[in-house]
Image (cartoon, helix red, strand yellow):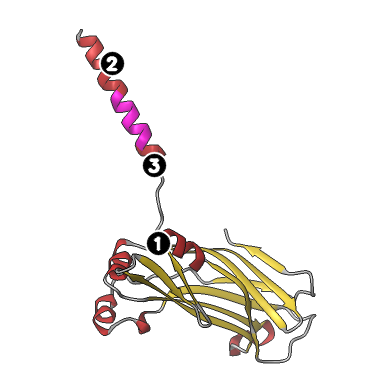
Amino acid sequence: MEHIRTSVKFFVLSICVLLVIASPVWAEGVEIKSVQFSAVKAGYEISVDSEITLNPTLEQALEKGVVLYFVTKFSLIDSRWYWLSDEVVRGKTRVGLRYYALTRQYLLNYPSHSQSFNTLAEALQALSQLRDFPLTIKSELKADVDYIASLRIWLDLTRMPKPFQVEALGSSKWDFSSEKLEWQMKLPAPGQPFQIKAH
C-alpha cells in the first residue's frame, strides 16, 4: 500500500514538473523581428515587424489611464561620413496606446488615424507592425554607395505625465526599448526590396 502511495506521489510530482517546463515564458520588452526597405515612386518606404510585450508596471499605468507613446526611428547614414553622422534618410513615427475603462477598449492613436481593439494583445499586435511608412530624403542618394542603416523602437517617457517621469528616473521597469539594430546596405532597386531579419 505504501509503495502505491509513493508511486502516485511520484507520478503527480512528475506531471507538475512537466507542466512547469511546458509553460511558456513571456519576455518583456521590444524585439525587432524583421525590416523591409523598399523603393517606390515617391521615394522609399520601410516596413517593420516587431514584438512588444508590456511589463506589469506599464500595464498598470495603462489601466490608470496613462497614454503610452511608442516611437519608431529609422536612419540611413552615408558610411563615408559616418563620423559626422550625415543622415541622408530619416523616418520617425510616434503611436499612442491608451485604455478606456468605460468602454473597456484599447486605442492606438496614429499620426493620421485611430484604431480600437477589444484586448491588449490585439492592440500590441497591431502596434508591433509598421507598414509602408514613407521616409524623408534629406540629401542626394547614390545607388553605388554603402549606407549604414539603424532602427530602434522605444517608449517615449517625455510624453508621460510628470509624476510618472519622476518615477521612471533610474527605474529599469520604465526603460522600455529595443536594441538598436544596425546594418550596412546599398539602395534597393524598385521591385527589389532590401530585407533583413534580426537574430
Q: Which residues, given as a range, are shown in magenta?
A: 12-19
Q: Position of residue 82 (x, y in %)?
A: 62, 84
Farthest residue toward the left? 2
Quadrant housing residue 161:
bottom left
Mark 3 or mark 1, which is nearer the start of the sequence? 3
Q: Which mark is residue 120?
A: 1
Quarter the C terminus occupies: bottom right
Assign the magenta stretch its main secondary structure: helix
Helix, strand or loop at label 1? It is helix
Q: How crowded is the residue under tag 2: few (<14 C-alpha within 10 Å), some, or many (20+)?
A: few
Please say if 17 is above or below 45: above
Task: Say which of marks 3 and 2 sits in front.
Answer: 3
- Residue bearing mark 2: 7
| Front residue (pair 95, 82) | 95
Q: Amino acid at mark 3?
A: Ser
- Tell me the crowding category of disc 1: few under 14, some 14 to 19, or many 20 or more residues within 10 angstroms, Cα based: some
Camera-nearest residue between 24 and 181: 24
At 33% across and 33% down in the image, what residue appears?
Answer: 17
What residue is disc 3 on? Answer: 23
Q: What amino acid type should be assigned to the residue bearing mark 1?
A: Leu
Seen as rendered, the residue at the extreme bottom is: 139
**What x and y, as percent, mark residue 57?**
29, 66
| 15 in magenta | yes
Where is residue 116, by image quadrant?
Answer: bottom left
